[in-house]
Amino acid sequence: MAHDTRGEVLGRLADAVGSVAVAHPTRVAVDGPPAAGKTTLADELAGILRDQDRHVIRATIDDFLLPRAQRYPRGEYSAEGCYYDTHDHAALNRVLLDPLGPGGDRRFQPAVYDHTTDAVSSPPVTTAPADAVLLFDGVFLMRPELIDRWDLRVYVSTAFEATVDRAVLRQRRVSSRVEVERRWRERYIPAQQLYNAAVRPTDHVDVIVHNDDPRRPVWERGPPR
């Protein structure tokens, strides 16, 4: 595996999206651990696709959280709670992934939750063009509830220790290093280890982007489906 420039990796991802032949919008999963660089990668890919005149829908798992009162029945630092109790996968399928999939009417909503207010969100229903691209980033996207909904599967891989350091930088204005490290080491990293053991996500993706050095990521093709 050779290190590529970031532009080269993004260009190859855009080509991969363009090569998907489906009669409905192309649903792209950008999976990976927290702080691996999924959102940035998806945002940059969206810009390239829009420059190619593709209609892009950007959405994230963070807008499909369950309300806070439902997320922590196992405790605030529970890895099992992070994996099993955090996201509303049924709503995600119902309002976004299934409408954009085979036989769907393409009428979708990009969110059901507003994390700034911890309240249900109900944005307007929009109709997507048939050739639209959904770029959806988030954790645990290859889990059984979701895996069959994706037309292209990308996994952004980063060493867990690197994600801790990135999280500390990202959250330094709102959380102390001690708090961020505790949340990562007790909840987020063990939840990813649980996910990896249960699902083996990299066995099911089309592309792995090794993002330890975001300036020089490494492209790896996933195993044949």
Image: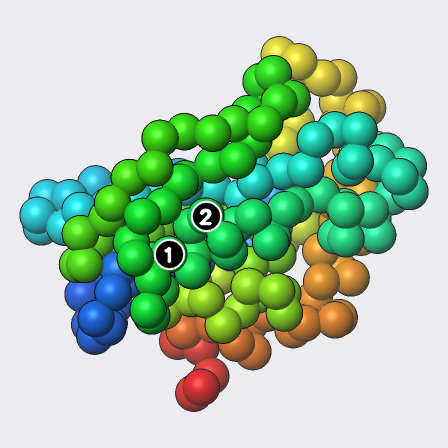
- Location of residue 209 (image quadrant): bottom left
For disc 1, the marked residue is: 99
Question: Badge 1, how many Cα within 10 Å: few under 14, some, many 20+?
Answer: many
Q: Answer with left or right where residue 65 lies relative to residue 84.
A: left
Name the residue located 33 percent from the left edge and 69 percent from the top edge: 103
Residue type at numbered disc 2: Val
Disc 1, SS: loop
Front-most of residues 191 and 169 = 191
Q: CA distance from mark 2 to mark 1?
A: 7 Å
Q: In the rendered view of the protein, which quadrant contains the C terminus?
A: bottom left
Name the residue located 49 percent from the left edge and 61 percent from the top edge: 155
Q: Position of residue 217 (x, y in %)?
A: 39, 55
Circle on res. 163:
none
- Location of residue 90 (image quadrant): bottom right
In the rendered view, would you say 150 is above or below 7?
below
Q: Position of residue 16 (x, y in %)?
A: 25, 68
For disc 2, the marked residue is: 95
Visual colour scheme: rainbow
User: Decide: marks 2, 1 in contact (CB < 8 A)?
Assistant: yes
Front-most of residues 23 and 125 = 125
Disc 2, SS: helix
Name the residue located 50 percent from the left edge and 53 percent from the top edge: 94
Q: Answer with left or right where residue 189 lies relative to residue 46.
A: right
Residue type at numbered disc 1: Pro
- Location of residue 9 (image quadrant): bottom left
Residue 190 seen by the camera:
yes
Question: Badge 2, how many Cα within 10 Å: few under 14, some, many 20+?
Answer: some
- Residue lying furthest bottom in this view? 224
In the rendered view, would you say 26 is above or below 178?
below
Name the residue located 61 percent from the left edge and 65 percent from the top edge: 145
Residue 220 seen by the camera:
no
Q: Position of residue 142 (x, y in %)?
A: 57, 65
